Image: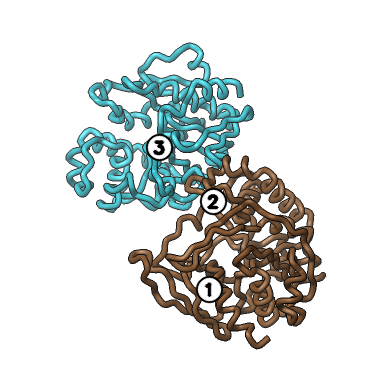
Chain colours: A brown, B cyan
C-alpha cells in the first residue's frame, strides 16, 4: 500500500507557501522518510525559485490557478498585520488529489521534528485527526481553538490529518466538499461569525454530522502532541529540532515570553516569521 | 414488583407545572412504551391531560407549601404518595428524549439513587458549581433531586423520614450543615444532600460516573463564554415528527431538564401529542 504526505501550496502576494512546502518536505524526509507530493497552482515558480526541490518532493500535482475573494488578516507578532488573499480551498479536494493509498495531509506551516506521525499507519483507522492541541504559550487561553463557535461544536484541526482510501474516507470528504459548496448555509447553522471558509470548521462539521449530530469518539486522535503557536507569536530561531519563539504576553500587550521546544512538531501560524527562518535554513541549498 | 415514573406538580401563579408534567408523561409514553406514569398533584387536570397518566394521586396530608412560590415543601411526600414499589422521580420541567428503560436494570442494584453528575446540551460533563456554591462551601454531596429513584424499603423510608424532618426544619439544618454561602430558601437538593451527609450514604446512593443523568440547561453550566440570561434566547429548538429533539447543533438523548418555562410552547406540546 503506497504511503506519503500531501502538501498543498498556493502563494499570495506576500506569503510564499511554496517555500514553506519545500522546507516542510525537507523536514518530512528527515524525520518521517516518507514520499512527499506537492499540489500547487504554480509549478513554474517552484521549479525556478527552488530548483533543488526534487531532493525533498517526489511528486507534483498541478492545480488550476484561481483568484479568491477571501481575505484574511495575517499577523506578524502583535503589531504588524496584513490583509491578504487566503487560498485554502484545495484542501477539501485532498481525497482525489493524493497519489497515495494512505496519506498524511499537512499544512506547510506545520514543522515536523520527530517521527511520531509514522504511528498513524499502525492504527488501522480510516481517518485520524487532532482533536486537541497544546499551546506553546502556557499563559494563553484561546477559546476560539476549542469550539467552532461559542455555542457550537468541538473544533478539530485540519492542519494535519491522516486518511486511508476507503468508503468511509470517501464519504467523509464528499461531505466536506458539500459543506464547502454550501458554506454560507453551514456557517449560519453553526453560528460562525466569520464569512471566510475555514477547513478546520468544515472538517469539524462533517465529523459532527457523521457522528449523528452528537459528540462521539470518532475519529481518533492522531498520535503525538499537536503543538501550536499563534500569529501573535514570533519564531526567531530554528536549529536542528530546536525552535525558539517569542510568545505573546496576553496580560501585557507588546511584551513577550521566551519559549523553546525541542523535538516537538509545531504549527507555526506566523507565516512571516516562519518564512524568515526558512530563508536562513535553505540558504545553502 | 411494579414500577413507574412519578412527577410531582403544584401550579403557582406563573408556572403551569401540571402541563409540564403532561408533556413529560407524553415523552415517557413515546420513548418508553409500557412504562407507567403517575402525577402527584392537588391541582385540576384538564380531561385531555389526564389520559397521559396511569395514576393520579393527591398530595398526602395538608399542603405545606401554601405560602411558597417554589412549592418544594411537599416533595418529601413523594415516597409515601407513589403507587409503585420502584419509582423514578422526575422534575416536571423535563422531557424524556430516548428510551431509558434500561435504567431500571441498573437501579435494581440500589434502594435509593440520586443523580450527581449532569451534562450540557453538548453532552459535556458539567464542571461548574456556579449554582452550587453552597454544596462546595459546605462539602455537601452533589445530589440532584431532579431525577432520583427509590424502592419502597426500610432504607429508603429512613431516608425520606429524615428528609421530612430536614425540609420542615430547613433553617435549623442549614445552620448546622450549610451555613457557608447560606441559601435563604428551602431547596430539595440541599435538603437531600444534608440527609445523605447525616446518614453517610454518599457512596451508596449516588455514582458520579453513572449513565443515569440528565441534561441540565441552566445557562451558566453550558461552558459558554458569553452566558445569556436564558438559553432559549441563543440556541434553537427543533422537534422532529419522530420525537427527535435538537438543541442548537446537537441531538438530545436521555432526559432534558429544560429549566425555562417558555421552552414548552404549545407547538412542542402539540408535536408531543402527535407522536
Does residue B241 appear to the left or right of A138 in the view shown? right
Which residue is disc 1 drawn over?
A273
Quick check: do tags 1 and 2 share a chain?
yes
Check disc 2: other Cα within 10 Å, few if <14, some if 14-19, many if 20+: many
In which quadrant is the C terminus of chain A drawn?
bottom right
Q: Earlier in the sequence, mark 1 or mark 2?
A: 2
Q: CA distance from mark 3 to mark 2?
A: 31 Å
Q: CA distance from mark 1 to mark 2?
A: 27 Å
- Chain ID of residue with mark 2: A
Vertical arrangement, residue B5 with respect to residue A279, above or below: above
Residue B69 makes an appearance in the image? yes
Q: Nearer the viewer, mark 3 or mark 1?
A: 1
Q: Residue at x 53, y 37 (%)?
A: B247
**Residue B146 numbered mark, or none:** 3
Vertical arrangement, residue A145 with respect to residue A188, above or below: below
Q: Residue at x 38, y 64 (%)?
A: A250
- Chain ID of residue with mark 1: A
In which quadrant is the N terminus of chain A drawn?
bottom right
Quadrant for residue A121, please give it.
bottom right
Q: CA distance from mark 3 to mark 1?
A: 55 Å
Under tag 3, what secondary structure? strand
Residue most extreme to the bottom? A284
Quick check: do tags 3 and 1 share a chain?
no
- Chain ID of residue with mark 3: B
**Residue A148 numbered mark, or none:** 2
Asked if labels 1 and 3 touch by Cβ distance under 8 angstroms, the answer is no
Vertical arrangement, residue B274 with respect to residue A272, above or below: above
Amino acid at each position: 500500500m503506497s504511503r506519503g504526505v500531501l502538501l498543498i501550496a498556493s502563494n499570495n502576494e506576500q506569503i510564499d507557501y511554496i517555500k514553506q512546502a519545500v522546507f516542510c518536505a525537507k523536514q518530512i524526509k528527515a524525520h518521517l522518510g516518507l514520499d512527499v507530493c506537492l499540489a500547487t497552482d504554480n509549478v513554474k515558480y517552484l521549479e525556478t525559485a527552488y530548483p533543488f526541490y526534487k531532493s525533498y518532493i517526489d511528486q507534483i500535482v498541478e492545480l488550476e490557478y484561481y483568484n479568491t475573494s477571501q481575505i484574511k488578516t495575517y499577523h506578524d507578532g502583535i503589531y504588524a498585520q496584513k490583509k491578504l488573499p487566503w487560498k485554502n480551498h484545495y484542501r477539501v479536494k485532498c481525497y482525489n488529489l493524493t497519489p497515495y493509498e494512505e496519506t498524511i495531509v499537512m499544512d506547510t506551516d506545520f514543522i515536523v521534528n520527530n517521527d511520531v506521525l509514522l504511528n498513524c499507519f499502525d492504527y488501522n483507522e480510516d481517518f485520524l485527526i487532532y482533536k486537541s492541541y497544546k499551546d506553546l504559550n502556557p499563559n494563553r487561553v484561546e477559546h476560539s481553538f476549542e469550539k467552532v463557535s461559542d455555542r457550537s461544536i468541538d473544533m478539530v484541526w485540519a492542519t494535519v490529518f491522516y486518511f486511508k482510501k476507503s468508503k468511509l474516507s470517501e464519504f467523509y470528504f464528499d461531505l466536506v466538499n458539500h459543506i464547502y459548496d454550501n458554506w454560507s448555509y453551514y456557517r449560519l447553522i453553526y453560528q460562525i461569525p466569520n464569512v471566510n471558509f475555514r477547513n478546520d470548521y468544515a472538517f469539524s462539521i462533517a465529523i459532527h454530522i457523521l457522528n449523528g449530530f452528537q459528540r462521539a469518539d470518532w475519529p481518533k486522535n492522531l498520535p503525538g502532541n499537536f503543538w501550536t503557536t499563534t500569529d501573535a507569536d514570533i519564531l526567531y530561531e530554528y536549529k536542528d529540532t530546536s525552535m525558539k519563539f517569542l510568545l505573546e504576553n496576553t496580560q501585557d500587550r507588546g511584551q513577550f515570553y521566551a519559549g523553546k521546544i525541542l523535538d516537538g512538531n509545531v504549527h507555526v501560524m506566523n507565516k512571516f516569521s516562519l518564512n524568515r527562518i526558512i530563508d536562513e535554513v535553505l540558504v545553502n541549498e | 414488583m411494579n414500577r413507574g415514573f412519578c412527577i410531582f406538580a403544584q401550579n403557582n401563579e406563573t408556572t403551569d407545572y401540571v402541563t409540564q408534567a403532561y408533556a413529560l408523561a407524553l415523552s415517557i409514553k413515546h420513548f418508553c412504551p409500557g412504562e407507567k406514569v403517575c402525577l402527584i398533584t392537588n391541582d385540576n387536570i384538564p380531561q385531555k391531560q389526564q389520559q397521559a397518566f396511569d395514576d393520579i394521586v393527591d398530595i398526602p396530608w395538608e399542603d405545606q407549601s401554601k405560602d411558597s412560590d417554589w412549592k418544594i415543601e411537599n416533595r418529601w411526600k413523594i415516597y409515601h404518595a407513589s403507587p409503585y414499589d420502584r419509582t423514578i422521580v422526575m422534575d416536571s420541567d423535563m422531557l424524556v428524549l430516548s428510551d431509558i428503560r434500561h435504567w431500571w436494570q441498573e437501579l435494581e442494584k440500589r434502594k435509593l439513587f440520586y443523580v450527581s453528575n449532569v451534562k450540557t446540551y453538548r453532552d459535556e460533563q458539567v464542571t461548574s458549581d456556579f449554582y452550587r456554591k453552597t454544596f462546595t462551601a459546605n462539602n455537601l454531596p452533589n445530589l440532584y433531586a431532579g431525577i432520583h429513584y427509590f424502592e419502597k424499603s426500610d432504607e429508603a423510608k429512613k431516608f425520606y423520614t429524615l428528609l421530612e424532618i430536614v425540609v420542615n426544619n430547613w433553617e435549623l439544618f442549614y445552620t448546622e450543615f450549610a451555613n457557608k454561602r447560606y441559601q435563604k430558601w428551602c431547596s430539595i437538593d440541599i435538603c437531600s444532600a444534608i440527609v445523605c451527609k447525616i446518614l453517610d450514604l454518599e457512596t451508596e446512593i449516588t455514582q458520579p460516573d453513572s449513565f443515569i443523568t440528565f441534561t441540565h440547561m441552566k445557562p451558566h453550566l453550558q461552558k459558554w463564554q458569553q452566558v445569556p440570561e436564558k438559553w432559549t434566547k441563543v440556541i434553537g429548538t427543533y422537534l422532529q415528527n419522530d420525537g427527535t429533539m435538537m438543541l442548537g447543533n446537537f441531538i438530545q438523548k436521555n432526559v432534558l431538564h429544560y429549566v425555562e418555562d417558555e421552552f414548552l410552547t404549545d407547538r412542542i406540546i402539540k408535536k408531543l401529542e402527535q407522536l
